[in-house]
Image (cartoon, rainbow, N blue to C red):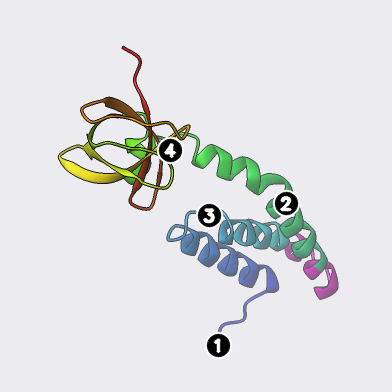
Amino acid sequence: MLNLASWHLWVIGGVILIIMEMFTLSFFLASFGVAALITAIAAAYDASLEWQLGVFAIANVFLLIVLRPFVVKGLYRRSDARPTNCHALVGTKALVVDSITDDNRPGRVKLGGEEWRGLSFDGSSIPEDTVVEVVSIDGSTLTVRPLLK
């Protein structure tokens, strides 16, 4: 029969948690795994169960509160921050196909081959065939402003 010391159990638990972290990539389970490995060192020096749990708790708090933010920041440092979907359309040029008269009557704006509802950024009228810039998007409504010629 297997007779495992407590430090063996801490090492096994720590390794399992670190392996599970490979599927989450948030450094949450890994912090528990590293805390378990640190606790294995205390258990190897014949610390009582209370001391082992104390070491585990202190190591966990340190790793989660102090170290985790730095690791997560380093992991996601190279992520792409470019806008996507409709947010990528902000700043693009469009053409007014149905004049925008005021905030109460939106016009139609053609953007990328599609027609959208269009509102003026400052509430002014924008005549047909005016090239505009998209300022913001709310649902299916573009807020635009005329481009200076």
Residue 50 is inside the magenta segment: yes
In the image, what residue type sits under mark 3?
Ser
Q: Are marks 2 and 3 in contact (CB under 8 Å)?
A: no
Q: Which mark is residue 79?
A: 4
In the image, what residue type sits under mark 1?
Met
Q: Nearer the viewer, mark 3 or mark 1?
A: 3
User: In the depicted view, which residue is nearer to us: 127 or 108?
Assistant: 127
Q: CA distance from mark 2 to mark 1?
A: 40 Å
In the image, what residue type sits under mark 2?
Ile
First reached walking from the N terminus: tag 2 or tag 1: 1
First reached walking from the N terminus: tag 3 or tag 1: 1
Magenta residues, start to end: 42-53
User: In the depicted view, which residue is nearer to us: 115 or 13?
Assistant: 115
First reached walking from the N terminus: tag 2 or tag 4: 2
- Residue 144 visible in the displayed image: yes
Label 4 neighbour load within 10 Å: few <14, some 14-19, many 20+: few
Tag 2 secondary structure:
helix
